[in-house]
Amino acid sequence: MKETDVLALPLTQPLRDAGVDFVVHEHPVIRTAEDIRSRTDFSVERSVKVMAFTAEAGRVVLAAVPGPARLQYGRLAATVGVRRSSLKPAGADVLEALGMEPGGVSPLCTKPDVTVVLDSAIPDMGRVFCGSGRADCTLELEAADILRMAHNPVVAGIAAPRDA
């Protein structure tokens, strides 16, 4: 990817403006933990997995959990005050409206009406890898900066260990 392409990522300018120390890594398209293991040198343990959902009244929720963890859907629903049954995976049209694509969903959404829920473990994870909006680029930054930069962030226990 050329430097001009990296500069075109919608999330990089707000990070620069805020003085966040970050790196954009380019790589083959990744969408799963296995893709991370086989196509990059990133640690799944240091990754932040982000899933996008729609809920009642067209509400958009981004849920971020540590890479090896499982999202607890009931906990997420309770955290954002909706019924579990109303949480639906966001479609390609919703992701496109957010400036994102499958495999590249980022907790650093630039839309102020999107609720970002971070698992309570994330702020203390140190330097992490997360989506950039594109499946072929990953952001590396401090987890505390994700919390600082996310619009409408909520921190709650929404994850369970993978083997739980």
Image (cartoon, rainbow, N blue to C red):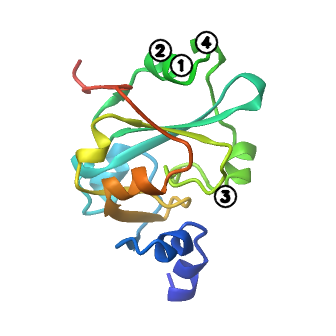
Q: Say which element carries label 2.
A: helix
Which residue type does callout 2 highlight?
Gly
- The quarter of the picture where the C terminus appears is top left
Which residue is labeled 1 in the image? Answer: 77
Q: Say which element carries label 4.
A: loop
For the residues labelled 2 and 1, say whether their Cβ atoms are less than 8 Å apart: yes
Give the mark, 4 or 2, whose residue is nearer the N terminus: 2
Counting from the top left corner in percent of width and height, residue 48 is at: 36, 47
Which residue is labeled 3 in the image? Answer: 99
Which residue is labeled 4 in the image? Answer: 83
Q: Residue at x 34, y 26 (%)?
A: 157
Q: Residue at x 27, y 37 (%)?
A: 121
Which residue type does callout 3 highlight?
Gly
Q: Which of labels 3 and 1 is toward the front?
A: 1
For the residues labelled 3 and 1, say whether their Cβ atoms are less than 8 Å apart: no
For the residues labelled 4 and 2, say whether their Cβ atoms are less than 8 Å apart: no
Which residue is labeled 2 in the image? Answer: 74
Q: Residues within 10 Å of mark 3 (few under 14, many from 20)?
A: many
Alpha-carbon distance for marks 2 and 3? 27 Å
Q: Say which element carries label 3.
A: loop
Alpha-carbon distance for marks 4 and 2? 8 Å
Give the mark, 2 or 3, whose residue is nearer the N terminus: 2
Alpha-carbon distance for marks 3 and 1? 24 Å
